[in-house]
Structures are given as structure tokens and as C-alpha cells.
Image (cartoon, helix red, strand yellow):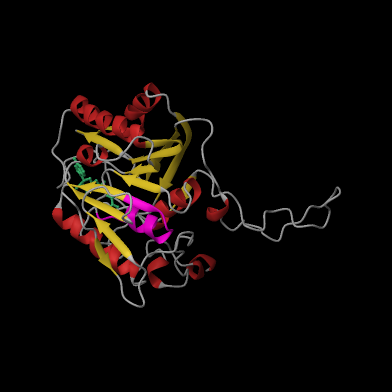
Amino acid sequence: MVFQPTLFVNETTRSLTISDMYDDQADVTLFRGDRIDLLQQIPDRAAQLIVTSPPYNIGKEYEPRLSLDHYIATQEQTIVQAVRCLSDTGSICWQVGNHVDNGEIVPIDMILYPIFKRLGLKMRNRIIWTFGHGLHTTHRFSGRYETIIWFTKSDDYFFNVDPVRVTQKYPGKKHFKGSKKGEYSGNPLGKNPADVWDIPNVKANHVEKTDHPCQFPIGLIERLILSMTQEGDLVIDPYIGVGSTAVAAYRHKRKAAGAGITSNYLHTARERLILESEGKLKTRPMNQPTHEPDPNTSIVKNPFLESSDDEAD
Ligand SMILES: C[S@@+](CC[C@H](N)C(=O)[O-])C[C@H]1O[C@@H](n2cnc3c(N)ncnc32)[C@H](O)[C@@H]1O
């Protein structure tokens, strides 16, 4: 079958081609179906980055609840195919939290790590993604982080931290002795963002919120794409959801391919991409610091403490 990708364009928009089967000429492939059926369409070593957040096997609306062994086997199938599609200089990032069973937590990165190692990959970072909001638990501490495990296929991998540097705490700091005395000591482009990322998760009033219960913040994916790929590279997300990876890839002139089994989410992904091509998609800026509330607002004042005036009396 000859496939005609959809092309969206007018005077103010960037051109955007979306294909529903893998097409290396399309900007984005949004495949409706299982992730293995998409990955099998993609040639060996075609992708520079594979980044995803798979189902956690916790009974969300889009996943059947499987035995843990069965779940691990499905993840292994995805990872094996993903590694086949990955270039020798490429990176693979699995963003995961906990599988929870009867109050017992199973960190998914721990149970998947042996699969990546068996396939000969090397871990480069275990990034802690921390966020302020989530479920309040009563029989354990409330969970406020997930991880991104980053592996490469070889030691000769592409990584450029410059596009994702963040402002130093003291950018005006100078060398105080030696041959560089008096010169600024920090990198003018900012500092390495390190491996703990405080980025609000997409809940409630977040500007990026869609009908999906657990989408990536675009700014989180941008950091991975900008540091691990170059323009024109292919980024694959086997569990594309509402297309956050595709939006970030398209924004930075990379190609993207992803699969989804839920039509509504794919529809939303398509709408977000079209808005992005028109420059109308609202997103939270990549390195925006987290919001600090104004200490003078009544909601910040602790009503259960005596006021300092009273204490002074
Ligand atoms: C944790 S969410 C990923 C959300 C995504 N990162 C985003 O920003 O929208 C997992 C997604 O995997 C999808 N999914 C579940 N089983 C799948 C399968 N076999 N193949 C492809 N996608 C699947 C679900 O519909 C869900 O949207």
C-alpha cells in the first residue's frame, strides 16, 4: 500500500507531516496499535534516542493488571526491539516509578535493570525526577519522585550538555586566587543540570494537562532530546500516549515515531502537534524554576501556629 502522510501547513505554520505507519520522510509517525508492531516497522539502528514511560502495571485505565513476571516479560519484549532500533551512538531512557501491590512497592527501574544489562547496555545516569504533588499515603511516606534510567549501546555515545545547562546559583562568582584570579569561574552557558530534576508533574492546573492521567512534562523530554540527539535524528517513544515526546522532538527539528493503543490519546497527540506547528501549543518553559509561593499570602501562613506578635507578648 502506498501511504500518503497528512500535511498541515499555512503561511504562519511550520510544515508538519504525520504518518500513521513508519515513514522515515514524515516528521512524525503516530501508529495506532501495539508498540511491537510499530518497532518491527523500523530498521535496525535507525534511532538516536528511544525514550518512554511504559505502563507501570498498577491498573490504570489503559493497562490490564498482569502478574509481575508477565509484566517484566512484556517490558523485555519492548526493550529488545527498542535496542535493535537504536544506533550504536544512541541512548535509551526508561522513565518509571513503582509498581504497587497490596501496599508493597516494587521500583520498576530495579526490576528492569537486569534486562538492559543482559543486552549489553551501559547505564550513564539514574536521574531522579522529583515533583511536589501526588497521592498522600498513610502507611508509608508519600512518593514524590520517579526515575529515568539512561543507558547507551556503546562507550562512543552522543551527549552534549550545552543546550540544557541551567543558571548557576552564583553566576557572578569569580576565581579568588591563581592565574584566573578575578575572572568568572562558572561556564557562561550555565551549569550541568545534574541528575536530580525538580520539574512539576502534569496534574490539575498544569498548562500542559490533557485527558491523559500521567503525561510527560514537555520540558523533561526536551532535556533528554536536546542533550542526546541532533537535528534530523529519529526519536522513538514506544508508548507515545498523548504525544509529549513527539511534540518535543518536532519542536527541536528531530523526527519522532510512537505507538498508542488508545484512539483518544492519539487524537490528542495529533491535535497537540498541529498546535505546536502553528506556534500555539502552551507549554511550561524547559528550565523554569518551580513556583515559590509569596510568603505574605494568607494561604502560606500557618493558622495552627501562634503569631509572632503573640509570642513577643
Ligand atoms: C505512562 S503512559 C505514557 C504517557 C506519555 N509519556 C505521554 O506523555 O503522553 C503509557 C501509555 O502507554 C499506552 N499503552 C499501553 N499499552 C500499550 C501498548 N501495548 N502499545 C503502545 N502503547 C501502549 C497507554 O495507552 C498509555 O498512554
Q: Is residue 281 visible?
A: no
Q: Tell me residue 16's x, y (percent).
A: 32, 64
**Residue 244 forms part of the magenta stretch:** yes
Give the quadrant of residue 67: top left
Q: Position of residue 214 (x, y in %)?
A: 26, 51
Residue in view at x 27 percent, y 44 percent: 137
**Where's residue 122, x and y in %?**
46, 29
Q: Position of residue 17 (x, y in %)?
A: 29, 61
Q: Between residues 305 and 151, which one lies in front from this camera angle?
A: 151
Q: Is residue 60 left or right of residue 81?
A: left
Specify whether residue 245 is painted magenta: yes
Of residues 144 and 155, which is closer to you in this image?
155
Which residue is located at x 44 percent, y 64 percent? Answer: 285
Please, is residue 138 above or below residue 293 in the view?
above
Residue occupying the far bottom of the picture? 11
Q: Is residue 105 visible?
A: yes
Region rendered in magenta: 242-256
Q: Is residue 202 above or below residue 61?
A: below
Q: Quadrant of residue 28?
A: bottom left
Q: Residue at x 34, y 51 (%)?
A: 256
